[in-house]
Image (spheres, coloured by chain):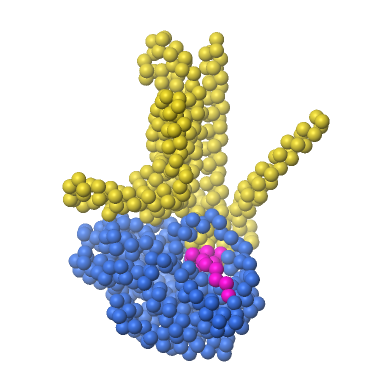
Amino acid sequence: MTATTLRHRSLKTSAIALGLAIALSAPAAAADLVISNWDGYMAPDAMAAFKAATGVSGEVVVHATNEEIMGKLVASGGKGYDVVFVSSPFAEVLNKLGLIETIDHAKVPNLANLYPEAAKLPHDVGNNFSVPYTWGTTGLCYRSDLVKTEPASWNDLLAPSDALKGKTTMLATDRWLLAAGQLAKGYSVNETDPAKLAEVKDLLISAKKTLLAYDDTTFYSKLISGEALMVQAWDGWCNYGIAENPQIKYTIPKEGSDLWVDTMVVMKASANKDAAFQFINFMLDAKNHAWAAQNIDYKVPNKPAMESLPADFLAKFPNMSMPVAELVKFEQLRDVGDAQRDYSKIVSEIKAAQ
Amino acid sequence: MRSFVPSRSSLLMAPALAWLTALMVVPCALVLALAFFRRGIYGGIEYSFTLENFGLVLDPLYASIFLNSARIAGAATLIAVVIGYAAAYAIAAAPRRWQPVFLFFSVLPFWSNYLIRTYAWIVLLNREGLITQLLRWFGYTGEPPSMLYTEGAVIAGLVYNYLPFVILACYAPLSRLNPELAEASRDLGASAMTTFRRVILPLTVPGIAAGAVFVFVLSIGNFVTPALLGGGRFQMIGNLVYDQFLTANDWPFGAALAMALIAIMLLVLTAQALAADRAAGRVAEAKGGADD
């Protein structure tokens, strides 16, 4: 398990390094297909295997965050890209902007491998414009050897016991940071009512005083070193900690989690849509999709792929075996439109609070 | 021949001017223009004119972030100037042949990357870090001190990274100081303290001002150090601008914030230029006096 080479989602540090230099230009397209994905989010030899199977060559470019690729796609109208990996709220936005193509199910027969629930996700019922690639939850990741009682509620993180004060971290990305407060209060993770958001803000400001740090990328190493004892974490990332120290455990608080889904979309500006669908079909192949589950430790919505996972792997990472019916009970993060500016402001207020 | 001189100098200027225009003037103008548009509902830019982004900058929340950044940058500047001036004074007072060696060591950290130098502080300060291990080695058994992810850690990181600027800026006037001035002051009965306060310090104000402005301007806009050493718990204006561009996808507001920050920096630089001008007058006077 080479978890440490993996940096998905919001890779703050490299994003910082690259922060000032957002290239708006589209990549040079010598290959038939240009695919933008997070670093390490598919098999290193995937493109070679795809070429061997179909004769289509593909070039993979890397984005560090959803926001980074969104900036490029919105600025260029999607030109220069064929297939892009983005989280579901961003796929929703790309669809509303008319930048992505309808998925031609006839050209993606491997869609049949998906769990039936994966075709009924609220952000895109029927997989009209997006194909789910990975999915999971956001919960609490903790050191079971150093935390006296197993955490049961989001309040165990937001109002920690004295022993945990200064030894917890929360995610810095605004939607997940707010989700912890929204769930603790029993609100929707897409709540936009200003009065309720104000309550969430107050709760998160009081929680801030007990935090070690906000951390999107190294929280699991803080657990391994013992700097932190309990952190808000994506299930797959908690697995990176578990891989290093089996005393690290993952739990979903009783108030629930969000259901996050990362998807594949095809750009409307693509000149090679048939090949793009072929590529998505290739990724949905049970063996290829199982690679993602086994190497990035994320659940994939592919039934035969999940069924092929070895027993020792599942024993090591208990959250991989979460039943699909339970997973899809949670609410997805949705695009909140104009309320996004309120969300950003609240997050700034929380981070600026002394 | 003479008529060629201006055209040759303009020829020599051309690359620098082209560079500045392409990489400074045009991008700044683009950012400024961006600040007058609206954020599209899905994060793009809606090309309709508005002043609301500048209004938002004045919101008490963002104004308080500006003030807080100025406070942190101010503290870093003060500490860096005190330490840097003392170091520069010591170097200037060292034997001539050792001075280049000391200067070399003070700029040596610049040879490694800013991010790596900042990460080194994480290794030092974290709860299970080198300082804690050292304390334990000396027999300390209590709770490890919380040093990382504090305002102190952010200030320490800024001071450490920008200290060489102050040393270099203060060393220049200190090393050129005519030692006869100090001798004359002592001969006329001034104490060492008075000599420093009334003679040496005023003559080196331009160096102090230049070093201080470097530290302040670089600190107030910094976003890497607060993100890494502050653990995201201390929002500085640089982080706010970064977040608007890279997470909130609100480029127009981010542009307005960036413009406000540039305006503050220009004010500080102008103040420094004025102070340097006045001090230069004093230096010329003192030089004239010494030559008599």
Give whichever of B58, B218 is nearer the camera: B218
Seen at 38% across and 66% down, the residue is: A4
Give whichever of B176, B150 is nearer the camera: B176
Q: Indicate the position of residue A279 as horizontal and vertical percent values.
A: 55, 81
**Is any atom of residue B242 visible in this view?**
yes
Bounds of the magenta span? A58-71
- Asked if the magenta segment contains residue A341, the reply would be no
Vertical order, A160 against A272 (above or below):
above
- Asked if the magenta segment contains residue A59, the reply would be yes
Q: Indicate the position of residue B279 as horizontal and vertical percent values.
A: 53, 25
Name the quarter where the N terminus of chain A is drawn: bottom left
What shade does chain A have? blue
Give whichever of B64, B265 is nearer the camera: B265
Seen at 22% across and 70% down, the residue is: A150
Residue B29 is left or right of residue A204, and the answer is right
Q: Indicate the position of residue A226 as horizontal and vertical percent values.
A: 27, 60
Residue B130 is left or right of residue A105, and the answer is left
Q: Indicate the position of residue A298 as horizontal and vertical percent values.
A: 39, 76
The residue most toward the front is B97
Residue A325 is left or right of residue A264, and the answer is left
Seen at 37% across and 43% down, the residue is: B156
Vertical order, A261 against B66 (above or below):
below
Give whichever of B111, B268 is nearer the camera: B111
- Chain identifier for the yellow-coloured part of the image: B
**Is any atom of residue A238 visible in this view?**
no
Number of callouts: 0
Seen at 41% across and 48% down, the residue is: B117
